[in-house]
Structure formats: C-alpha cells, structure tokens
Image (cartoon, rainbow, N blue to C red):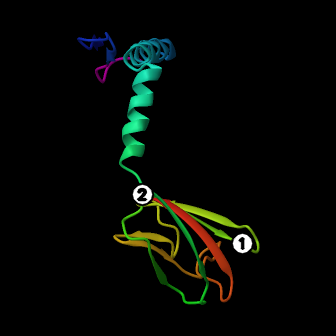
Amino acid sequence: MATYTENFGLHQWVPEDDFLRTDFNTDFQKIDAALGEALTDDDLTEVWTEIFSKCEFRFGSFVGNGASSRAIDVGGEPSIVVVTNTQSMETTMFTKSLSMGPLAVLSNGFQVGVGGQVPQNLTDTVYCWFCLC
C-alpha cells in the first residue's frame, strides 16, 4: 500500500502497488499548484535579471577558410553560440553541453568546421555569429 510524502501528500508506491493514472494526475496537480504559488512573475523577472546581469552579449563575423576545425576567439567561454551563413542563411545554435559535429564551445570562444550537416567554415563564405558569455 502506498505511503505519502510529508509536505505535499504525493504517492510513494511500494513494489506490490498497482499504478493508477488518476494518482499521477493528482500528484502532478499538487506539484503544479505548489510551483504556481512558489514562483510569481516578479520572481521570474528577478531570476532572468540575475541571469542576464552575469551574461555578456558578443557578436562578430569571420570569413570561412575551409579548415576542418577552426577556433574563433571571443574573449570568454560562451554559454550559447549562434552562427549564420550569410549566403545561404543556414543557422546553427549550440551550447556548452550540446556540441554538434565540429561545432563546440571552447574556454575562450568556439570552434567551427566543415563537417556535420551544416558546415560553418566553407572557404570564402562570410559567417555572422553571436554568443552569450
């Protein structure tokens, strides 16, 4: 027989218990209500203000040289990078935790290359980029 958590009365099943969809729905409603009470719009504004106060927006461009791997120095470690091919307008976004082929975040910038589905270092192609450091 299930027991319940102390603070919100959420189900804590034991191996012999049958699971009911209504039990999950009830638990999710309790969680949603608690989160709704805990976070107001002012709280979210404060969180985003704090995040953006610690980030710097940087941007620039480079001309591709065809190398399979090339580092672009932005003077800091980006959290997120967006690179756009100005001829085809193909755009790629990647983060510290989500590298894509040759595209990766480095401690002082990011790496581009010609591998992968959307190459970002084709010879004589102009690329624009922006990032948050």
Farthest residue to the left: give it: 6
Q: Which residue is under mark 2? A: 79
* One can see residue 103 in this view: yes
Which badge, 2 or 1, is on the more N-terminal residue? 2
Check the picture and name the quadrant holding the N terminus.
top left
Rendered view: 114 above or below 40:
below
Residue at x 71% of width, y 72% of height: 86
As for residue 17 lying within the magenta part, the answer is yes
Whether the magenta-drawn stretch holds residue 78 is answered as no
Q: Amino acid at mark 2?
A: Ser
Where is residue 41 shown, x and y percent of the image?
47, 21
Q: Is residue 113 left or right of residue 125?
A: left
Residue closer to the observer: 94 or 75: 75
Q: Quadrant of the C terminus?
A: bottom left
Magenta-highlighted residues: 13-19
Tag 1 residue: 86
Residue 10: horizontal and vertical position, in percent?
Answer: 34, 14
Kind of element beneath mark 2: loop
Residue at image point 68% right, 82% down: 125
Q: Nearer the viewer, residue 12 or 133?
A: 133
Which residue type carries mark 1?
Answer: Thr
As displayed, is residue 116 above or below residue 45? below
Q: CA distance from mark 2 to mark 1?
A: 23 Å
